[in-house]
Image (spheres, helix red, strand yellow):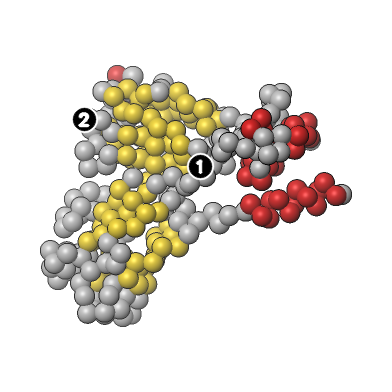
Amino acid sequence: MKLLTIILCILAANTTAISDVHIVTQPEGENAFEPKVINVHPGDTIRWIHNSGTHDVVNGLPCNQFEEPIFETMPLTAEEPTAEWVVPAAAYGEIPYFCSLYGHCEQGMTGTIIVTPRADSVVHVVDQIGVTFQPETIEVAPGDTVVWEWNNGGHSVTSGGIDSCEKDDVFFDLLLDSQHRSVVWEVPDTMPANLEYICIFHCEMGHVGNIVRILKGDLNEDGKVDGADLTLLLGCWGKPCGDINKSGTTDGQDLTILLGNWTITP
């Protein structure tokens, strides 16, 4: 009972908000968004607040919405004074937007959303080199972040079958090109043990990748996370031997990860 109390206290002390709310205002009497650039993470909420005039929030290159937007046009008026958008698990690293009304965009009413991994997330970078993803196979755990970086040409990052070259419309389907130089994906709990993905344009040429889910917290490598792993972690407290998140020491964050991956047996 005492051990359980200690564990619960440590978890409470190390629990952080999984998402933040970022406020963007339209200043009174100005055709502008403030701040002009915001840094967010997948799962965060962006809230635009109206102060005067009639405006909207349109995703696309200022001042030209030339492609299918990743969020719908949102009015920002006295009747509808707030607009919100939740950053999805998979998003472009840089998302431009603007006001499309009355020439406001040309007057500088534009903004940029920069999507970055969370500070406590393990980041895996995959480079697009020609018609390859390098490395082709990566190992991740829920809560990790995968960042695909563009190098040249026109490509996509699309979850789907390597053999069929068809997308699954489940996890991600985003462009990777000169206008979309990075794709950021926060690995969800629902990711399967093995996730294949493709470039929808070059799949038949072998432009494919594979993401393997690993079990964080399995310190004794027996294929499950249980009391034996908890004993090992507590024995490493304050030392690097049970450092699951690679912070340099074993602490409450590692305990949180271990318990979050606890293996439930029938």
Question: Who comes first in sequence, dot 2 or dot 1?
Answer: 1
Q: Classify 10 Å Cα crowding around label 2: few (below 14), some (14-19), many (20 and above).
A: few
In-front residue for pair 242/219: 242
In-front residue for pair 252/38: 252
Q: Classify 10 Å Cα crowding around label 1: few (below 14), some (14-19), many (20 and above).
A: some
Tell me which corner region of the image, top left, top right, bottom left or bottom right, holds residue 72: bottom left
As drawn, the residue found furthest toward the right would be 1
Looking at the picture, how far across and down is residue 136, in whole percent?
Answer: 41, 22
Residue at horizontal 82 percent and vertical 46 percent from the top: 3
Residue at horizontal 18 percent and vertical 56 percent from the top: 62
Residue at horizontal 73 percent and vertical 54 percent from the top: 9
Looking at the picture, how far across and down is residue 209, in whole percent?
Answer: 41, 25
| Residue type of the residue flagged with mark 2 | Gly
Tell me which corner region of the image, top left, top right, bottom left or bottom right, holds residue 143: top right
Please name which of the two marks, 2 or 1, marks the residue nearer to the observer.
Answer: 1
Position of the C terminus by quadrant = top right
Can residue 164 be seen in this snapshot?
Answer: no
Looking at the picture, how far across and down is residue 235, in whole percent?
Answer: 76, 34
| Residue type of the residue flagged with mark 1 | Ser
Q: Tell me if residue 208 comes above or below residue 145 in the rendering.
A: above
Residue at horizontal 44 percent and vertical 50 percent from the top: 42
Which residue is under mark 2?
153
Q: Tell me if residue 67 comes above or below residue 175 in the rendering.
A: below
Which residue is under mark 1?
121
